[in-house]
Amino acid sequence: MEAKHHGWWFNQLFTNWKKFEVIYVSVLIALQVVVYAIAPDTVIGMVSGVTGVLCLVFGMKGRKISFLFGVVQCLSMTYIAWISHAYGSFAMDIIYVISQPIGWFMWGRDEATHSFQPKTRRLIFGGAFIAWGIGWFVLATLHGQLPYFDSINFVVSIIAQTLYVLKFKENWSLWIVVNIANVIYWGVLTIQTLIGATDIGSLGANMSQVALQAALLFNSIYATKVWASGEADNEGGANK
């Protein structure tokens, strides 16, 4: 059926999905449920994981509904970051919460994706590297957990989220870096929790974040292709 025969919610949620996308989204959500079944010590961790997957998957499709799932994910992740002493992540998640309504407004005004000229792109990536070093120093001073990784999650994520809200294709390249760092970061915390090296946070919350970041890493790589092809323009065909 054509999207125009249905309402906004139906179009955003169900139209123009490829079979591959449906399969991988289902697998990523199932992964969050499996992690919760293994370590069911926090429902918030699973909520963060599932809504995080939905937020970024719909973002990959270029759809505004992404920001509704983003509000739930960011609020739950803020709590997890706080109990885990991941201060960079905590600060970033507050910014994420604020950015959701801004993104909703911006994507409503301009439905096309954009890209930078090569020189500008190099300047942005170079600035992100310098910002990471500064953030590392600040977070280390505050005695945060694994500040070299947490800094990527904080400062590089700010740049990536800004580009995402403005619908620049380069945001996904930065998210790939952030997601790789986060897989390592939460993986280390999970191992430390398992061996009793730390009592910060909980095993279930840490494991759910490993699964989430692995899912988001895959989604970021795939989204790079989708946005480069123009498939995410006009909300991925959901408003036709």
Image: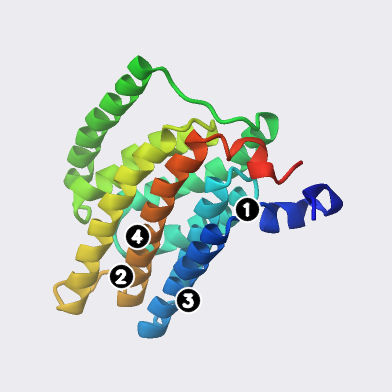
* Residue at x 63%, y 43% (from the top left corner): 236
Q: Which residue lies at the image location 85% right of the left edge and 52% below the top edge? A: 5
What amino acid type is highlighted by mark number 2?
Gly
Judging by the rendered image, the residue that carries numbered circle 3 is 43
Amino acid at circle 4 = Ala
Among the two numbered marks 1 and 2 on one chain, the one whose residue lies closer to the N terminus: 1
Q: Where is residue 18 in the image (x, y as percent from the top left)?
A: 58, 56
Give the spatial CA distance, label 3 vs label 1.
Answer: 19 Å
Say which element carries label 1. Answer: helix
Q: Which badge, 3 or 1, comes first in the chain's sequence?
A: 3
The disc, 3 or 2, on the residue closer to the chain's N-terminal end is 3
Q: How many labels does the image show?
A: 4
**Dots 4 and 1: beta carbons under 8 Å?**
no
Residue 83 visible here: no
Q: Mark 2 points at which residue?
A: 201
User: Which callout, 3 or 4, points at the residue further toward the start of the chain?
Assistant: 3
Report the amino acid beneath label 3. Val
Pair 1/2: label in front:
1
Q: Position of residue 39 (x, y in %)?
A: 36, 82
- What percent of the width, then of the height, locates residue 116? 44, 21
Kindly report the distance in space between the C-alpha atoms of the residues bearing marks 1 and 2.
26 Å
Q: Mark 1 points at which residue?
A: 68
